[in-house]
Amino acid sequence: MTTEDRVKATIKNIEGKAQEMLGEITGNPEDKAEGQVKQDEAKVEHIVENTKDEAKKTID
């Protein structure tokens, strides 16, 4: 995973946490749910890229 990809996934995770917290504060379940989805997407991106890194190490 490139550093840029890691940063993008981390930023998406932070945005998701912020949106989820905003949803909790304002009582907006839609914002809360969208924030959770962003966090889940970021988690999947990290898993996929980490798997690619491991596969590359194995091949090399």
Image: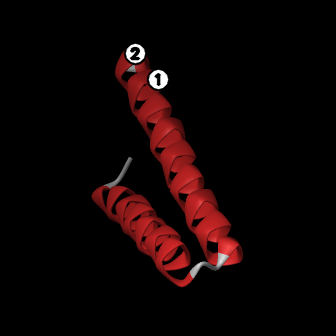
Q: Secondary structure at mark 1?
A: helix
Please tell me which residue lies in front, 38 or 25: 25
Residue positioned 51% across, 56% down in the render: 39
Question: Circle 2 — which element?
Answer: helix
In the image, residue 47 above or below residue 40: above
17 or 10: nearer the eye?
17
Residue pictured at 43% horizontal, 61% vertical: 13
Which residue is at 41% across, 73% downward? Answer: 18
Q: Are marks 1 and 2 in contact (CB under 8 Å)?
A: yes
| Residue 38 appears left or right of 51 | right
Q: Quadrant of residue 2?
A: bottom left
**As drawn, 9 above or below 34:** above
Under mark 2, the amino acid is Thr
Point out residue 37 in the picture as x, y percentages from the top left corner. 63, 59
Give the colour scheme of this rendering: secondary structure
Image coords of residue 24 (percent x, y): 52, 71
Query: How packed is label 2: few (under 14 Cα within 10 Å), some, or many (20 or more)?
Result: few
What residue is disc 1 on? Answer: 55
Q: Amino acid at mark 1?
A: Ala
Q: Which residue is disc 2 drawn over? A: 58
Relative to 44, residue 22 above or below:
below
